[in-house]
Image (cartoon, rainbow, N blue to C red):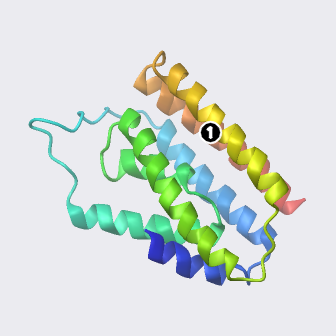
Amino acid sequence: MTLPAGVTGALSVRIPSGVLTAGFAVLAVVAATRMLRPRAEPAETGEGATPAPAGRVARTGAGLGAVTGFLGVGGGFLVVPALVAVVAVPMASAVGTSLLVITVNSVAALATRLATPTALHWATIAPFTAAAVLGAWDGKRLAAKVSTAALQRIFGAVLLAVAVFMLIDSVA
């Protein structure tokens, strides 16, 4: 996932930010719609479970890396739906797995962007990152009290709301 993220991250600096924001919003709507569709929860990976084929996992990861590198986002809005819908990972496992994927992908995209003329606003990045870490700890505690189906619906609904606001912002 990191190579496609790096390549498309370098290409994206030539695209106007409004276009990138609109692209993010459209993809978020698609991902949210997939998460809101009711479907049976895949079985937990373990004894007797059939993992997704390695080729499918690799193609999904490369595609996500390219898209998230291009848009300049960590990718959680796409990683969770892709893990659940394409790779058949249970929702609770997908959330944890996505955090590791997001971290690795973000580091690769950041390293690439540091080599471009794009300015990074560390005064915004640092507190946002700290708040996200604290929110993740609290989210873990809350997730233990919510069913997998409800967690998936909540994720989809919040993602859809964020997408709508971003789409409005990109055309305003």
Using the image, determine if residue 24 lies above or below residue 136: below
Using the image, determine if residue 27 lies above or below residue 70: above
Using the image, determine if residue 100 lies above or below residue 45: below
Pick the residue in front: 66 or 129.
129
Indicate the position of residue 148 as horizontal and vertical percent values: 41, 26
Residue 69 found in image quarter: bottom right
Q: Is residue 31 left or right of residue 113?
A: left
Residue 6 found in image quarter: bottom right
Pick the residue in front: 75 or 35.
75
- The residue under the point 28% across, 63% down is 56
Q: Look at label 1 and name its amino acid.
A: Val
Pick the residue in front: 93 or 26.
93
Q: Residue furthest right?
A: 172
- The residue under the point 81% across, 73% down is 119
Quarter of the picture holding the N terminus: bottom left
Pick the residue in front: 123 or 9.
123
Indicate the position of residue 45 as horizontal and vertical percent values: 21, 38
Mark 1: few/some/many CA within 10 Å (<14, 14-19, 20+): few
Quarter of the picture holding the C terminus: bottom right
Q: Give the labeled residue for mark 1.
A: 133
- The residue under the point 69% across, 47% down is 129
